[in-house]
Image: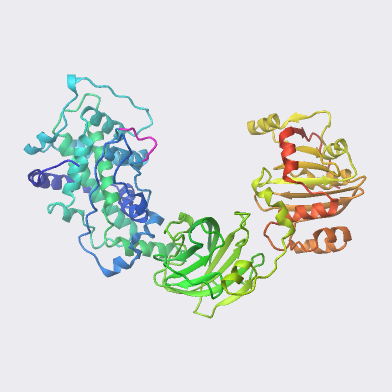
Amino acid sequence: MLDVPDELVDELGPPVAAGMRLLLGVIPAGPAARLGRLGASEQARPETRHTSVRPGHRRVPLPPPRQPVSTSSESAKILGLRRLGALYAPRVPDVAGHPDQTPSEPLGLAALREVGPLTTERLLGALELTVTGMEPVDVSGLTLYLPPPPAGGRYGFASAGHDSEALTAALLLDGVRRGLADLVLALARRLAVHPSIVPLLLVAPDAADEQAVAAQHGRAHLALAVAVAHTVVGHMQAPPLADRAAATVGMGIGAAAVLLGQTPMPPAYGPALLNKIRAEYLLPRGSFGSVRVSQHRFGLVEGSFPETVDFAGNGLVAVVDGGAVIRTGMADGPARVQLSVLAEEPPEVVSGWEEIVEVSWHAAEGLASVLGPDGTGEPQLRAQTPPWPGDYRLRVHARGRDDRDDPDAETYELVVWAAPAAPEVVHRRTDRLGHRLRGEPEQARPARPEHAYRWVRRSLLSGAATVTVTTGATVEEVLRAFGADPDRPESIRSIEADLYAGDSNFPWVAVLDAGPAILAVEYNGFQGSRESVLRRASARGRAASMFWNVNALMRLSFAEQGRLLAAFEPGMSAAEPEVDAEPAVAAATAGLELADHVDRHLKGLVAVERFTGYGITAADLDRVTTAGTGFRIISLVDDL
């Protein structure tokens, strides 16, 4: 960092303070608040703090952040802003790793680039006339620190055309006077703690709401940085192509962004932000993501993660200060978690989970987050519980803790609602891990039949597909049942190319003679679920299909000897009479627990296999993919 003597800082104090007073009245609140929240963003993500830049970058060491002028126990209690700030603060400039940053770009200009053209241009428009009308200040000691012009008096400059005017001008001026942006940043950083400037950086006591506090915080630091930039730029001769006012504002915004990213938020910001969050908090709310498990644990916690936890009580969840810790089957890795926060207790205990335990916990502050032991977590799972202290109930659902051969099987659902403290309730305890942790004999658990189709979740059929299995028919007969011409095969690649081009939206199917049966596979199609197709395909035997898509829509269908026996959405009660009326369909679906939403499409494939005597395998799908042949469906017969 530039070694600026105290005498120069003292000399700069009065003229910079005067410039700040002129600028404070013309900085708009919106972009000022955006800059002002950068400190909250930095505190919310301490791991993003940069003390150096990658090789090839000029390095400006970051000193420890200056402390706020005053603190209070109340503001210190508001979660330290580490979690609250992440909800409203924009991303702090990632000056070390921005892909557009050139290897020699100064720290302040990299931060200016991160601020973005819209905010930058709005600030330039607001400040340009005032900056142009400000008289240059004569600071005798500053001349010694101004970067010299290029040797020989020649220079070149290129712009991509998509940068803001302020960034373009600042880059040009710093390119001609290499080190100018670093000088502005160094002086602004020193002046930010100077006695003549500190009073101008304080947020007024009457600023109560989050927007006002953030705007005053950002406005003061921006005025400081622009006033410094004006003083520095006013001491040098700018090249003809450089817009002096735009360069001044640009360098000021960049320096302010760096300073604000390193400066603690004002003491008033914590309470103001908490009031804003409470006013906007609505129930019910839900989020889904993954959490990084470590040492077989993750938690729903307010503060630090506990070092040791005992799960011997119920084998799943342990209550700790400010939350709860969940015991996982996996030792390390990502676990899928769904978090729901409700206004009241859910009306029923849902099925489809192997372990369900309900506990009470007390929130000292509120806004607990789903975190791993290292304190990391996805944004959508952070600060989600109610922003008030009090007693809450937590129902933890777990599935797949025993399935070490299928890392995708382990999932969790956490349901939270406000309720008085009550005894622990174990709703379900069936997995082997839970029995071991509780010191109980392990229960024998036969493998579920749908587990044989878990490979589908990692295949090309995972998102949406229809699988149709037909017996007693030839490939040609199945294709004609679908409305395709057996004599017009095409490569799947060409079919997909036409679909991606968007010229038309047509169905198509791939078929495979699997010996005992004919397989018809539709990637993101549904013709195999239509009654007319199934009736024709089953004319001399049986046909069954399972359709699913990314919207969780499904249809399981059965036909025999040209007659549709049943077609329904698995798990829907309306299908039960239809299934019971057909013994062959009832036998195919027996014991599959279709009412349970987990892996319904895989359970449907089991039913298709039972009904037809053949089920699709991963090897079958590989054969279809390797052959690479598909058939466009050119005629659709309406269902009767």
Q: Is residue 98 magenta?
A: yes
Please say whether residue 182 is visible from this viewpoint.
yes
Left or right, residue 221 beside residue 6 = right
The residue positioned 49% from the left and 79% from the top of the image is 421
Please say whether residue 507 is visible from this viewpoint.
no
The residue positioned 76% from the left and 64% from the top of the image is 573
The residue positioned 68% from the left and 49% from the top of the image is 455
Residue placed most toward the observer, 323 or 86 = 323
Q: Is residue 618 magenta?
A: no
Residue placed most toward the observer, 535 or 216 = 535
Q: Position of residue 12 (x, y in %)?
A: 11, 44
Magenta span of residues: 97-103
Left or right, residue 140 beside residue 392 = left
Locate residue 281: give its quadrant.
bottom left
Please determine whether, in this image, residue 125 is positioned above or below residue 221. above
The kind of secondary structure the magenta stretch mainly shows is: loop
Locate residue 8: give its quadrant.
top left
Q: Position of residue 219 (x, y in %)?
A: 26, 50
Quarter of the picture holding the N terminus: top left
Q: Position of residue 627 (x, y in %)?
A: 74, 33
Residue placed most toward the observer, 147 or 210 = 147
